[in-house]
Every structure is written in C-alpha cells, then in structure tokens.
C-alpha cells in the first residue's frame, strides 16, 4: 500500500511537471479542463522590462504599459528610459531590457557580434528634422558652406546625416561644416541664444526647439525646413525609404517566438492608436517625460511617420539600408548584413 501511494504521488508530480512545460496553445488544445484553463490564464513570465529613448518610437511602449496590453504574458511590465547609445548597449549586454525601441542599426550590429537579438518591427521612417533661422533655406541642399549643429554622435542619425551630406559634395558646392554638440539640449540652447543658424534634431527635440522659440519670442524666427526622410530620395533614389527605428527583442526573450509576436502586435496596435490620437498619446508620454511640454510631444507625433510594420515585411527596405551602410559605414552594422533569422520572430 505504501509503495502504491508513493508511485501515485510520483506520477502526479511528473504530470504537473509535464503540464507546466506545455505552452498555452497546447494546453488550450488539450480539452479546456480546469487545470488547462488555469495554466492558460497564468502570465508567461513574472516581469518584462520595455525600454526606449524619449522619442516618438517609445510612445507606443509607454501606452502598452499604461493600458496593460501585455497582462496575459507578464505579471509585471515596466518601461525604462535610456538616453544614449552607449547606455542602451550596456543595458542590453547586462540583460536589463527585454524589448526596446532602437535605431535599426544597433540590433544588426549586436546580432553580427554574436548576440541573440531580433528586430521585430520598424515603426519610425523619419524622425530627424532640419530646423533653421534662415527662411531662404528650403532643404539640406541649401546648407553648402555653412555650419550645421548636430547632437548625433556614433549612432544611426550621425551615419545618415554624414552619408547625405557626403552625397551632396559631388554637386560642386562647398561642404557643410558639422558642429557636434554634447546633446540635443546643448544644440537647442545654442540655437535659442543665436549661436547657431541651422540644426538637425530628432523628434521630439525639434518640436521642443520650435515650441521654445515661439514661446520665448527671442532671436530670429525658427522654421521646420525638411526631414531627413524627405531629403533622402533626392540622393538615393534606389533607397527611397528610411527604416530608422523600431522594436527589438533582446537575448532574454529572442527565442520566445510566441511572446515576441504578441509584443510586436501589441506595439503595432499602440502605435496606430498614438498616431490617430496624438493629443491623448502626448499625455501618456508626458507622464514618462514630465520635462517635455505636452504641445511639443503632440506636434512630434503629428509630424513623424509612425507606422509599425513587421521586420519580415520590410526586410527588403532594411537590407537596402544595411547594404548602403556596409559600403559607407560598415562598422555601424558589424561589417555585414544580418542572417535571415534576425528579421522578426
């Protein structure tokens, strides 16, 4: 009798272990018993950390946290703000982020260095703007021989601006002198104090500069001139789109394809909501970026092409950009194009 009880208890433990390893879809297909329903309702993980910069690409992630979009998949979901490319690289290396908004070059670089990362989607196709005090400047092509302030250093924005300005040189015009600042705030301060005439800024910094210029009423009037996305096809007609930023899965979750698909879909839904509800989305973003005026956040959403598409669908556009960068700035992507498994879950 004692041996029979021991056998029964051991069998029960083994059954629990097997059921515990089964995924939710398998359990659901098993017949909908009470144990299966309970397993289906339980979150897949205890905690997920989403990350991103204080830019439009991150607003959908903030909305996902506020609305509990990932509640079926994680008991706790939080958003962590990062400020620099180096800080993001460190957070990813130490596995402090699961999913993050990112320039499209960084996950490619990490993947080519042997790290398990995937680019899930591209959602921002133009976030860098030229702002000027000169109404005669209608585009990047009108900056020949002049100084351009730029806060971009060692990231995709820096690479793209350098690539665009270099492409203008064969026109026979004097080269643009790029003056790099320590941060976007420094570039804004120089513009507002009259120490700069032209600047390139990513949203929402460009909208913040215009908002401050209008509210302070000091110095020459500022003009939103042209986005990098608008200027690009003039010099690269075979690469007309700029898949600049999107959503990536870090090594902590890259192999969980079900979770990655769920996060990508939730992000796409939140991105669509943000684009169609810019004032409300600006209020959500303001909670995480309290130093930013709501009007500047709203304007940033309105002028940004926020359109989330799975990386598998835009692989052609991504590879066209990566191929161009491989020729001109190979270190930005690790000297080669990512493998096929890099694109999406």
Image (cartoon, rainbow, N blue to C red):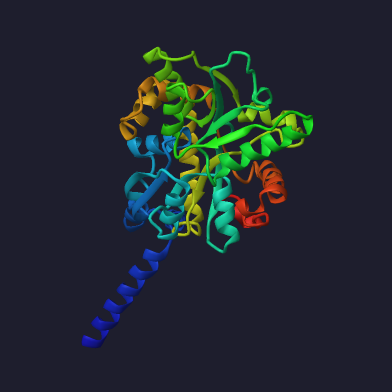
| Image side of residue 172 versus residue 272, left or right | right
Relative to residue 209, is residue 154 depicted above or below? below
Name the quarter where the N terminus is drawn: bottom left
Determine the residue positioned at 64% across, 39% down: 162
Q: Nearer the viewer, residue 110 or 260?
A: 110
**Does any portion of residue 273 appear in the rendered image?**
no
Res 307 quadrant in image: top right
Q: Nearer the viewer, residue 159 or 63?
A: 159
| Outermost residue toward the left in this view | 2
Measuring from the top left, give residue 7's x and y in whole percent: 29, 82
Res 135 quadrant in image: top right
Measuring from the top left, give residue 222's x and y in whole percent: 50, 16
| Number of dots carrying numbers | 0
Determine the residue positioned at 44% across, 45% down: 84
Measuring from the top left, give residue 318's x and y in whole percent: 65, 44
Q: Nearer the viewer, residue 228 or 14?
A: 228
| Image side of residue 338 versus residue 65, left or right | right
Q: Nearer the viewer, residue 44 or 248?
A: 248
Measuring from the top left, give residue 173's x and y in whole percent: 74, 28
Relative to residue 284, is residue 80 depicted above or below? below
Relative to residue 282, is residue 39 depicted above or below? below
**Does any portion of residue 58 appear in the rendered image?**
yes
């Amino acid at each position: 009798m004692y041996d029979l009880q021991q056998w029964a208890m051991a069998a029960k433990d083994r059954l629990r272990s097997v059921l515990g390893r089964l995924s939710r879809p398998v359990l659901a297909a098993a017949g909908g018993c009470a144990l299966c329903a309970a397993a289906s309702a339980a979150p897949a993980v205890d905690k997920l950390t989403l990350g991103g910069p204080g830019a439009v690409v991150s607003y959908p992630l903030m909305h996902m946290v506020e609305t509990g979009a990932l509640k079926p998949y994680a008991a706790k979901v939080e958003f962590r703000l990062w400020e620099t490319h180096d800080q993001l690289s460190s957070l990813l290396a130490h596995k402090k982020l699961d999913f993050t908004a990112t320039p499209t070059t960084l996950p490619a670089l990490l993947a080519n260095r042997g790290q398990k990362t995937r680019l899930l989607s591209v959602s921002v196709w133009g976030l860098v703007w030229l702002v000027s005090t000169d109404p005669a400047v209608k585009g990047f092509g009108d900056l020949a021989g002049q100084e351009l302030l730029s806060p971009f250093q060692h990231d995709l924005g820096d690479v793209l601006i350098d690539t665009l300005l270099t492409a203008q040189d064969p026109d026979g015009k004097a080269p643009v002198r790029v003056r790099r600042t320590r941060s976007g705030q420094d570039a804004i301060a120089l513009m507002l104090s009259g120490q700069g005439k032209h600047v390139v800024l990513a949203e929402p910094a460009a909208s913040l500069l215009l908002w401050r210029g209008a509210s302070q009423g000091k110095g020459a009037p500022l003009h939103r001139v042209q986005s990098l996305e608008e200027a690009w096809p003039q010099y690269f007609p075979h690469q007309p789109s700029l898949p600049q930023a999107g959503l990536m899965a870090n090594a902590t979750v890259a192999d969980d394809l079900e979770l990655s698909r769920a996060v990508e879909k939730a992000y796409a839904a939140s991105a669509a909501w943000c684009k169609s509800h810019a004032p409300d989305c600006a209020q959500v973003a303001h909670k995480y970026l309290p130093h930013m005026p709501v009007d500047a956040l709203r304007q940033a959403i309105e002028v940004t092409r926020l359109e989330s598409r799975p990386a598998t669908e835009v692989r052609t556009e991504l590879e066209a950009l990566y191929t161009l960068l491989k020729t001109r700035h190979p270190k930005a992507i690790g000297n080669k194009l990512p493998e096929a498994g890099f694109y999406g879950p």
